[in-house]
Image: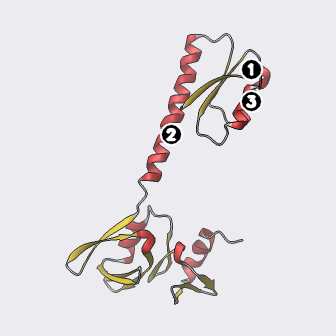
Amino acid sequence: IDVLFLDVEMPEMTGLELVEALKSTSLCIVLITSKMEYAVEAFEYNVTDYMTKPINYPRFLKAVDRVSEQLTKQQQSDETEESELSALFVKTDYKIVKIELHEISYIEALSDYVIIYASDKKYIVHSTMKGIEKKLEPAKNFLRVHRSYIVNKQHIESIQDLYVEIGGKSIPIGRSYKNNFMKSLNIL
């Protein structure tokens, strides 16, 4: 079920009580009533539309258009989440290797190359830090912490002074990267 057309006044419970019970779902809800007094409360529940009786055909079509718009936005949002990057294909040792992003601990710059540290393996790849950073942009867990390092937030063990600890390695945090890095963490 994607859409629910719901009368506010029902025998066993009100439509607003049902909306409250359904608030954790992604349903598009259109409330229908003969009284305008419920309108403000209805929109506090973030309903898609609110119609008063009697309902004419043009008004019904307007409600259907709003539902259609909302469903399209939800679908686009879902597709964006699904299309988030989950792996990286890199050329190393004369072959192309797939590296799952969740396995990458950190990436280190080495002149015209980068070293990708993932699951106790090292991959030396001909790329710049800027190039690899651009490829990792859709993945939200990777942060540049230094001109020579990108870290995966999921692998951070601790942070002390200007260093990040990942897998027993102390990675420096560059002063120009520190503020952005600290803001991106959920620190209590």
Which is nearer the eye, 12 or 9?
12
> Callout 1, which amino acid?
Met
- List the residue tagged with mark 3: 16
Q: Earlier in the sequence, mark 3 or mark 1?
A: 1
Q: Is residue 21 left or right of residue 110?
A: right
Q: Is residue 30 left or right of residue 88?
A: right
Give me the disc on residue 73.
2
Image spot of residue 152 (x, y percent) = 49, 74
Q: Marks 3 and 1, how far apart in space?
A: 10 Å
**Do the residues bearing badges 3 and 2 touch, measured as CB atoms within 8 Å?**
no
Question: Does residue 60 lie above or below 113 as drawn?
Answer: above
Which is nearer the eye, 180 or 80?
80
Mark nearer the viewer, 3 or 2? 3
Image spot of residue 12 (x, y percent) = 77, 23
Count of marks, rendered view: 3
Q: Quadrant of the N terminus?
A: top right
Question: Does residue 114 lie above or below 77 as drawn?
Answer: below
Which is nearer the eye, 152 or 58?
152
> Callout 2, which amino acid?
Lys
Image spot of residue 91 (x, y percent) = 25, 74
Say few, some or many: other residues with alpha carbon within 10 Å of mark 1 (under 14 / 14 to 19 / 20 or more). Answer: few
Image spot of residue 177 (x, y percent) = 55, 77
Q: Residue at x 51, y 35 (%)?
A: 71
> Callout 3, which amino acid?
Leu
Say few, some or many: other residues with alpha carbon within 10 Å of mark 3 (under 14 / 14 to 19 / 20 or more). Answer: many
- List the residue tagged with mark 1: 10
Q: Quadrant of residue 186?
A: bottom right
**Residue at the limit of the structure toward the right, as seen here:** 37
Dot 3 falls on a residue whose secondary structure is helix
Q: Quadrant of residue 54?
A: top right
Q: Marks 1 and 2, how far apart in space?
A: 30 Å
Q: Marks 3 and 2, how far apart in space?
A: 24 Å
